[in-house]
Image: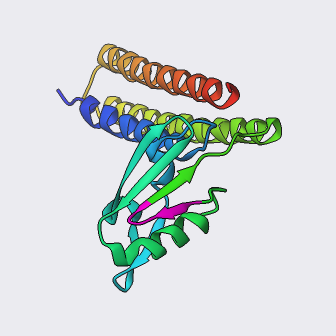
Amino acid sequence: MAEVDMADLRRRMDGAFEVLKNEFAGLRTGRASAGMLDPVQVDVYGSKMPLNQVGTVNVPEPRMLTVQVWDASSVKAVEKAIRESGLGLNPQTEGAVIRVPVPELNEERRQELTKVAGKYAEAARISVRNIRRDGMDGLKKMEKDSDISEDDHKRMSDDVQKLTDELIGKIDTQLSEKEKDIMTI
């Protein structure tokens, strides 16, 4: 008897959830997080490199990030990359350490970020539903080809639906936590 690969469906759905978590990490809240600087690309050694490959990002206090640059000749490039990243951050250099104060968010910006978080979550839900549809289509085809019985089709469909509901629930929980994070001072 053929089976729909539940492990593959779970892996793909978990992948959509991981993408959402990474997108949320890049959303700037009023609180500093090392993930805020993940999108920053630094122009060093003749190419663009992720910030975490040229220095260490730390969070010494709730509204401050520090970047310990490994190569002193790259400090100016790192500072410039952070300033021009579009994150609204204004880094200050102190030797090989760059201090990055995280400014307070105003109410309007908080509302905007909440909407962006909602869009990210909806995109993740759509991905999960598309993966669910692929699984269901596979089951229909297997039943049509007489690879599985109608009862097996029903049982496996229920399993796929349970998996989908579980992941959508995780997405919704993650979204409400992120919205709370954005809206709290």
Instruction: Give 164 or 72, whichever is nearer the viewer.
Output: 72
Res 48 visible: no
On the image, the x and y values in percent for residue 118 come to 66, 35
Quadrant for residue 119, please give it: top right
Q: Quadrant of the C terminus?
A: top right
Res 84 visible: yes
Quadrant for residue 111, please give it: top right
Instruction: Give 172 or 27, whichever is nearer the viewer.
Output: 27
On the image, the x and y values in percent for residue 30 come to 63, 37
Residue drawn at (29%, 20%), measured in percent from left and top? 149
Q: State which region is magenta.
A: 91-97
Q: Quadrant of the N terminus?
A: top left
The correct choice, above or below, for 159 with respect to 62 in the image is above
Q: Is residue 96 magenta?
A: yes
Instruction: Give 162 or 61, whichever is nearer the viewer.
Output: 61
- Which residue, as the protein is rendered here, is positioned at the far front? 95
The correct choice, above or below, for 112 with respect to 67 in the image is above
Q: Is residue 33 magenta?
A: no
Q: In this rendering, would 78 be left or right of 119? A: left
On the image, the x and y values in percent for residue 182 come to 65, 32
- Which residue, as the protein is rendered here, is positioned at the far left? 1
Residue drawn at (44%, 32%), measured in percent from left and top? 132
Q: In this rendering, would 111 be left or right of 180? A: right
Residue drawn at (41%, 66%), measured in percent from left and top? 95
Instruction: Give 154 or 47, whichever is nearer the viewer.
Output: 47
